[in-house]
Amino acid sequence: MQTPNPNNTLLSIQDLKVYFPILRGIVLQRQVGWIKAVDGLNFEIHRGATLGLVGESGCGKSTTGRAILQLQPPTNGQVYLEDAELTGLTGEPLRQMRRRMQMIFQDPYASLNPRMTIGNIISEPLEVFGIGTAIDREARVQDLLHQVGLSSEFRDRYPHEFSGGQRQRIVIARALALNPDFVVCDEPVSALDVSIQAQIVNLMQDLQAKLGLTYLFIAHDLSVVRHISDRIAVMYLGRIVELADSISLYENPLHPYTQVLLSAIPIPDPDVEAVRERVVLQGDIASPINLP
Amino acid sequence: MNEGEALGIVGESRSGKSVTMLSIMRLLSTPPKHRVTGDVQFGDRNLLKLSAAEIRSLRGSQVAMIFQDPMTSLNPVLRIEKQMTEAMRLHLGLSLAEAKARAASLLQRVGIPDAEERIRSYPHQFSGGMRQRVMIAMGLACNPKLLIADEPTTALDVTIQAQILELVKQLKQELHMAVIWITHDLSLLAGFADRILVMYAGQVVEQASLHDLYRNPRHPYTIGLLQSIPRLDQQRQRLQPIEGMPPSLIDYPAGCPFRPRCQFAIDACRTIDPPLEAMSDNHQVACWVKPSGQDLLQDPQSKLA
């Protein structure tokens, strides 16, 4: 985790909004309101740094990730990758930009095609962009498998032969195939067993150091986010309520919601737990349809 | 286990935590498909030897269970009221009106506002946290002596998890009920359990009181688990994962099941599966080496923050 150079902004986001219409009626649909999934986000991520994005389910974390990659067209706002504006791009220019940004999803069981071999899965992005000859691609697959700590013999096997942790390694290898600058990691470890989570977190940190990757790390588990991120943004109902570097966020949380979130995380130490004060939130999260 | 005690069971997926509990409740389908042997004593009765009718009268009334997924463990086409009163009428012999009143007061107790109104709702009208509260209320319906909670908060947000944990803690104290809490998350139990059982590949590898387990774990797997979780109150440079994967139960290794992943393994581990040995009155470990977790966890670097 190096200190990023202040002029070295890789990604910047200005006033990003994603609204979904609420429709009523079957044939004659009329719009009766908006769900403000993401409501006016501004932040920057420096090259080689990791921004953690935390919040409860339904607060718009994943939508933010998808809107940055233009998988979900934003309603409003701009996303810049270095100097290039991504918002508004369509067709071929957007496709070319996609090479530079990749995504790692939460569920490694659902994000690999069960009918493709591991080799095909990892080389597919290369084929799509027509990179190299078949032999070059083969070599690249071997290299990628090696980088994520898997044996190159695995390339002829199918996803069902692998455990969750191994699958997540394959997903990471696929995301790295095109040498991206920026990777959105949407809850990459929350579907894995505790003892495997640490393996994947370490792998992601090693790859970041080696390849100079920039991560947007989306998760609901603050202890993992704190471990991997330089800065953390706390989201609540589509907005960022607090954005701070990871140490000061923990030491001195300013927003009441951040304090609640921090106090809800259990610490594996009975003595610490015995003296901790817990701020227990009353009730459920408000519905984004009906904002208070 | 004693009355009013809180026991935590920790282990990874497929380590046999849930199957243990299902067999206590006799919810596994019986032979020829499965084989359950041994004794489960509840009070002075052996649960595995009871007839189907006897176990049915025990389930729900003496022993209650709440499941992992509140989204699927309620019947979506019945009102909450109907689902809650069913067990009470059966086990407590209450009239419909009495059962309804009791159900409403239980919902109130687990923190559902406007319980009298909400009891007429269907499960889909509740959020995940609310449904888990309903499940707990159902579990409490007949004043059980033992509540088995099988990863009840895994599908929920951390803030809701904290609420549920707090609730069960309170109820345990008020009703003097024993609780078995199954989880894969060791940190969750630190503020809750009196005693913890660590399972690996279908076996208990360590059993200790809360403090002994966190302060001086002696099984390499427990030590590894504690080392591999990032802690919110500490800044670490690097996590220390447990390498490798849990063994397949079909192709079970000879000797100690943890041996392939264990950094302390010696020759004996290869051939003979270590038995559970008592270290002290309240601490048992199944390991030939029994490295001192106290020394291993004293990592000066980890105290930086």
Image (cartoon, helix red, strand yellow):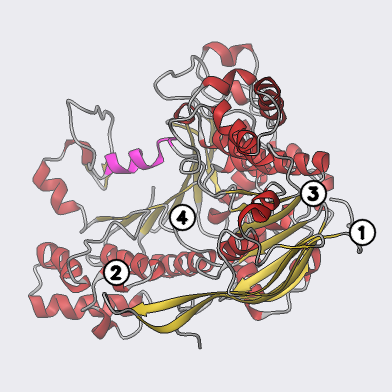
Q: Is residue A206 shown in magenta?
A: no
Name the secondary structure under disc 2: helix
Would you identify the image quadrant in which residue A232 lies?
A: bottom right
Q: CA distance from mark 1 to mark 2?
A: 50 Å
For disc 2, the neighbor class at 10 Å (few under 14, some 14 to 19, many from 20) is some
Q: Earlier in the sequence, mark 4 or mark 3?
A: 4
State the extent of the magenta-drawn residues as a range.
B14-24
* Residue under the point 21% across and 57% down: B60
* Residue under the point 41% across and 68% down: B129
In this rendering, the label closer to the viewer, 1 or 3:
1
- SS assignment for the magenta stretch, majority: helix
Q: Do marks 1 and 4 share a chain?
A: no
Q: Identify the residue under disc 2.
A: B124
Name the secondary structure under disc 3: helix
Mark number for residue B302?
3
* Residue under the point 24% across and 84% down: B116
Type of the residue with mark 1: Asn
**Number of marks in the rendered image:** 4
For disc 3, the neighbor class at 10 Å (few under 14, some 14 to 19, many from 20) is some
Q: CA distance from mark 3 to mark 2?
A: 45 Å
Q: Is residue B17 shown in magenta?
A: yes
Residue A14 percent location from the top left of the image: 73, 74
Q: Identify the residue under disc 4.
A: B154
Chain letter of the residue carrying label 3: B
The answer to whether residue B235 is above or below residue B294 is: below
Q: Do marks 4 and 2 share a chain?
A: yes
Residue A178 percent location from the top left of the image: 70, 39
Q: Identify the residue under disc 1.
A: A5
Chain letter of the residue carrying label 4: B
Q: CA distance from mark 4 to mark 3?
A: 27 Å
Q: Do marks 3 and 2 share a chain?
A: yes
Type of the residue with mark 3: Ser
